[in-house]
């Protein structure tokens, strides 16, 4: 069930969760972010056969981390939605990738200040593209070798979304 009006819209509803990721209520997106309430999100990393990861530059219209480089796709769970369907939905909305099955769950990040109070499931998927990038969500995207992405993060950390830097540090422990 989706209680959202439009992605990023003020009328968007999220499940509010406790320290154990159990739903305790619902609130509008703006309230969740303004009050620092715990909520849920997904990040999907898409790798190609050459081992490159697709990264996106977030649209300047985004309310969080506008214009910063981020995971292949990411987003909040709608109120009443579970992680796997959210990952499938985000792939479709942001990259135009449709599938009957969710991508593979890779690892989980507990809610913290770096994630903006989000419990996050990180997924991985192999795909070659081409992708249909959603212009309200993504300015552009590119394929990058993991070692090169890490070098870029070390040189210019300010151009990457904070949660993505945490996600990528955890990815490097698993590659």
Image (cartoon, helix red, strand yellow):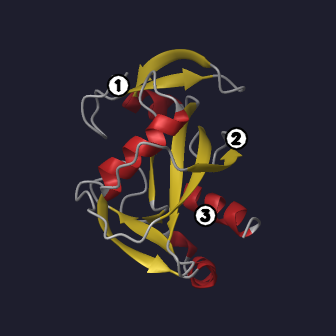
Which quadrant is the N terminus positioned in? Answer: top left
Percent of width and height locating residue 124: 57, 57
SS class of the residue under badge 1?
Answer: loop
Residue at 35% x, 25% y: name it. Answer: 2
Percent of width and height locating residue 157: 57, 73
Q: Badge 1 is on which residue?
A: 2
SS class of the residue under badge 2?
Answer: loop
For label 2, count other residues whose C-alpha is less than 10 Å away and answer few (under 14), some (14-19) or many (20+): some
Asked if the residue at tag 1 contacts the one at tag 2, i.e. Cβ–Cβ closer than 8 Å, the answer is no
Disc 2 from disc 1: Cα separation: 24 Å
Mark sitting on residue 165: 3
For label 1, count other residues whose C-alpha is less than 10 Å away and answer few (under 14), some (14-19) or many (20+): few
Which quadrant is the C terminus positioned in? Answer: bottom right
Asked if the residue at tag 1 contacts the one at tag 3, i.e. Cβ–Cβ closer than 8 Å, the answer is no
Disc 2 from disc 3: Cα separation: 15 Å
Q: Quadrant of residue 96?
A: bottom left
- How many numbered marks does the figure carry? 3
Is 60 situated left or right of 156 in this image? left
Q: Badge 2 is on which residue?
A: 110
């Amino acid at each position: 069930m989706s209680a959202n009006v439009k992605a990023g819209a003020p009328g968007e509803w999220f499940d509010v969760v406790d320290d154990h990721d159990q739903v305790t209520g619902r609130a509008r997106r703006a309230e969740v972010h303004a009050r620092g309430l715990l909520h849920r999100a997904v990040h999907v990393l898409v790798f190609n056969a050459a081992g490159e990861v697709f990264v996106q530059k977030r649209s300047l219209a985004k309310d969080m981390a506008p214009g910063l480089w981020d995971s292949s796709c990411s987003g909040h769970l709608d109120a009443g939605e579970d992680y796997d369907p959210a990952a499938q939905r985000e792939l479709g909305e942001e990259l135009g990738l449709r599938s009957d099955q969710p991508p593979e769950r890779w690892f989980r990040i507990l809610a913290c200040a770096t994630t903006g109070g989000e419990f996050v499931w990180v997924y991985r998927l192999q795909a070659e593209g081409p992708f249909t990038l959603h212009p309200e969500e993504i300015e552009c995207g590119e394929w990058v070798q993991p070692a090169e992405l890490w070098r870029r993060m070390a040189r210019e950390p300010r151009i990457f979304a904070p949660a993505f830097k945490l996600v990528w540090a955890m990815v490097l422990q698993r590659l």
